[in-house]
Image: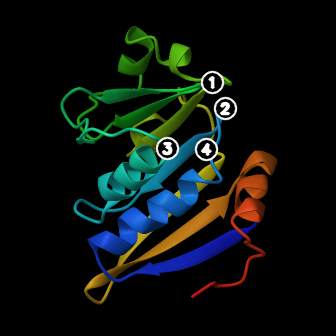
Amino acid sequence: MVEITYTAPDEEAMVALGAKLAGALRGGLTVYLNGDLGMGKTTLARGIVQASGHEGAVKSPTYTLVEPYELEGLTIYHFDLYRLGSAEELEFMGIRDYFGSHSLALLEWPERGQGILPPGDLVITIERQGLGRSVTIYAATSAGVDVLSDLGGDGSNPN
C-alpha cells in the first residue's frame, strides 16, 4: 500500500497536519493513531476535529474512552483506549454502533482493542524526531489509498 511521512516541528504544525488530513477524510473511515505517550496523537486529532467544523474544545477521551463530535453530515468519534482493561470491554459499550458510513473513527492505542476493532484504513504512527515529530501515514486499505491520493501522496516524502 501507500505511505507518506511528514515532519511536524511543533504543536502548531501537528494541528495543521490534522487540518490537512481533515480535508481528505470522510465518513466510513477508521484511523489508527499510534505513538508513545506525549507524541501528539490527541493534538493531531484536535486538528482533524476542528478543521472538520467543531468550534469548541477537543479534549483527550482518556477517562471517557470516547468523545463524539456531531458535525453536519458526519460524527467524529475520538477514542483513547489507553485505560481499557480488555478488548472485550468494547463489546459492552456497543463499539460496533460507532462505525458506519456517516462516522469517522479516530482511535488512539488501537492495539488495546485488537480482535474487536475493525481494521484501520489509515495507520498513523507518530515518533519523536529531535524536538519535533515524524508522522508516517500508511494506507492499509483501498479507502486509505484514496485518502492519501487526495492528499497528493504517491509514496514519496512531501517534506
Q: Where in the figure is residue 127, as x and y percent of width and height?
A: 38, 73
Disc 3 versus disc 1: nearer the observer: 3
Q: Which residue is mark 4?
A: 120
Residue 52: which numbered mark, if any?
3
> Under tag 4, what secondary structure?
loop
- Quadrant in the picture for the C terminus: bottom right
25 or 106, nearer to the observer: 25
Q: Amino acid at mark 4?
A: Gly
Disc 2 versus disc 1: nearer the observer: 1
Q: Which residue is mark 2?
A: 28
Name the residue located 63 percent from the left edge and 84 percent from the top edge.
158
The answer to whether mark 2 and mark 1 are in CB contact below 8 A is yes
**Tag 3: Cα neighbours inside 10 Å, few (<14), some, or many (≥20)?**
many
The answer to whether mark 3 and mark 4 are in CB contact below 8 A is no
Disc 3/disc 1 C-alpha distance (Å):
13 Å
Q: Amino acid at mark 2?
A: Gly
Q: Amino acid at mark 1?
A: His
Depicted 150 relative to depicted 87: above or below? below
Disc 1 versus disc 4: nearer the observer: 1
Name the residue located 39 percent from the left edge and 50 percent from the top edge.
45
> Under tag 3, what secondary structure?
loop
Q: Amino acid at mark 3?
A: Ser
Q: Earlier in the sequence, mark 2 or mark 1?
A: 2
